[in-house]
Amino acid sequence: MVFSSQLFLFYFLPLALLLYYAAPVRARHLLLTLMSYVFYGWANPLFTVLMLVSTLIDYVAGLVIAGPGTPQLPAGGPRTRKQRAAVILSIVSNLTLLGFFKYFNFALDNVNALLEAIGGPAGRLDIALRITLPLGISFYTFQSMSYTIDVYRGHAQAIRRFVDFACYVSMFPQLVAGPIIRFSEVADQMRQRTHTMEKFARGAAFLCLGLAKKVLLANPCGKIADTVFGAAGAGVLDAWYGVTAYAFQIYFDFSGYSDMAIGLGLMLGFVFAKNFDSPYHSASITEFWRRWHISLSTWLRDYLYIPLGGNRATSGRVYVNLALVMLLGGLWHGAAWNFVIWGALHGGVLALERFAGKRPLYYRWPKPLRVAATFVLVLISWVFFRAPDLPSAWAYLKNLFGAGLTPEGARLIEGLIYQPYYLLIFAVSAIVTWGAPQTWDWTRRLPGWKIILLLAVFVIAVVTLATQTFNPFIYFIF
């Protein structure tokens, strides 16, 4: 089930809100958990079993770490062998589940390629062994791990009621595509939170704007990108147009989903942290990662980069840490060499900027030129993110710089991608990206004219949604 569907908007969500607010306060977490399991299991009920196993392991590990009657462990204090074993069990079990279901097929493909290279029976292991990737496993495993780590570090109290912890892990607003909600951020809200009309109205505004981003901007830009990336070849202008359309697509797709998730959380009384901060305004790659997918970048920083030594390590080790974290961040996004290279590119530039004092190589340029240069670097990296495989990525890069072979029929795509509708959407996407206020700021106050505008945008988005057949959420596959 996806947010941008009539099933969710007009059936599941109204029913979930009605039951939630009609239920006694103490029963709301149970109800929300049950509704979330229905939401998650709609496509494949077996996925819920895996999430339940992960939830049980981390719930028990949290109780073992906290011990009986301990409100919260002292931060930085000594830990027993049992406590260390419990947090290790939690981390290993979550990473094992994630690694098996996400990377088994990737490993199998590489084994088969190696067998073929050395003259072995290529594809022999491919006959019966294939694993289906459960939706959202990258998000809820990281989220669940943050609970046991936060309890172990003394940053949060352990949850005593299983249903409360199950609710935290499975909450449908952010379950399948984030943002990654760390337990320490919502620990107090899990115990007590307020429900107000102002919070509900702001949540509805987030939902409307996020839906509009997804349906009115991301989907049409995705059609442009798919046409260009799927063509046998493209001219230089077409290639840059296509990858820029993809940059708009992935931004509005994921930030739109995050807006809807934050809005749904507000409608249920939860306040989630901002996940995007106008990332294409960045004047360096370092700044880009402070603004893009903030919940992931800060998770990697606090649970991986800093434990590896962070900025306290020797200068050489800092660069290694940056590269390693970004490589793992690339693999987190997908089990393919494309994502490894994407992570390596960002890690390499981050290391260079760190070496230059956290400044881009073009730091002497005027800020508009720095923003433009950073955006071009991001566009080049997006080629590896979007292309289906490495040969396709290299071919597309050649097209960007005029070094590729353009088939005679390549010009046929111009009639598809330069239609007035697509050019208009492309222009509006650019204006919204660099000229419009963020949803987070625009929804702080909701006078009458904004409410009318939101209703109009919602109606247009719903009507458009009814006519679209192209409606993927990119981050569902991660």
Image (cartoon, rainbow, N blue to C red):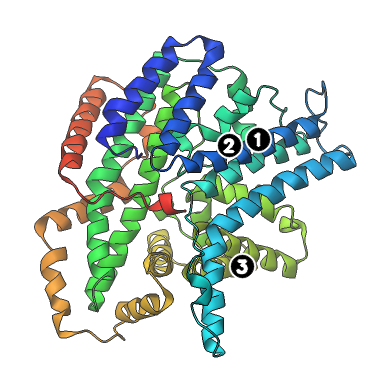
Q: What is the C-alpha distance between the residues marked 3 and 2?
A: 39 Å
The residue nearer to you, when weighing 390 against 78, is: 390
- Left or right relative to 58: residue 215: left
Q: Is residue 153 above or below residue 434?
A: above
- Left or right relative to 364: residue 472: left
Q: Residues within 10 Å of mark 2 (few under 14, many from 20)?
A: some
Q: Is residue 446 above or below residue 230?
A: above
Determine which of the numbered discs, if any, sits on residue 142 in the image: none
- The residue at 31%/77% (across/down) is 400
Does residue 324 show up? yes
Secondary structure under the numbered disc 1 in the rendered image = helix
The numbered mark, 1 or 3, whose residue comes first in the sequence reads 1
Q: List the residue tagged with mark 2.
A: 52
How many numbered badges does the structure rendering display?
3
Q: Residues within 10 Å of mark 1 (few under 14, many from 20)?
A: some
Q: List the residue tagged with mark 3.
A: 351
The numbered mark, 3 or 2, whose residue comes first in the sequence reads 2
The residue nearer to you, when weighing 82 against 78, is: 82
Does residue 340 show up? no
Residue 345 location, x and y as percent?
52, 70
* Residues at marks 2 and 1 touching, judged by CB atoms closer than 8 Å: yes
Determine which of the numbered discs, if any, sits on residue 56 in the image: 1
Farthest-out residue, front: 128
Q: Quadrant of residue 78?
A: top right
Q: Amino acid at mark 3?
A: Ala
Residue 52 location, x and y as percent?
58, 37
Q: What is the C-alpha distance between the residues marked 2 and 1?
A: 6 Å
* Residues at marks 1 and 3 touching, judged by CB atoms closer than 8 Å: no
Q: Quadrant of residue 377?
A: bottom left
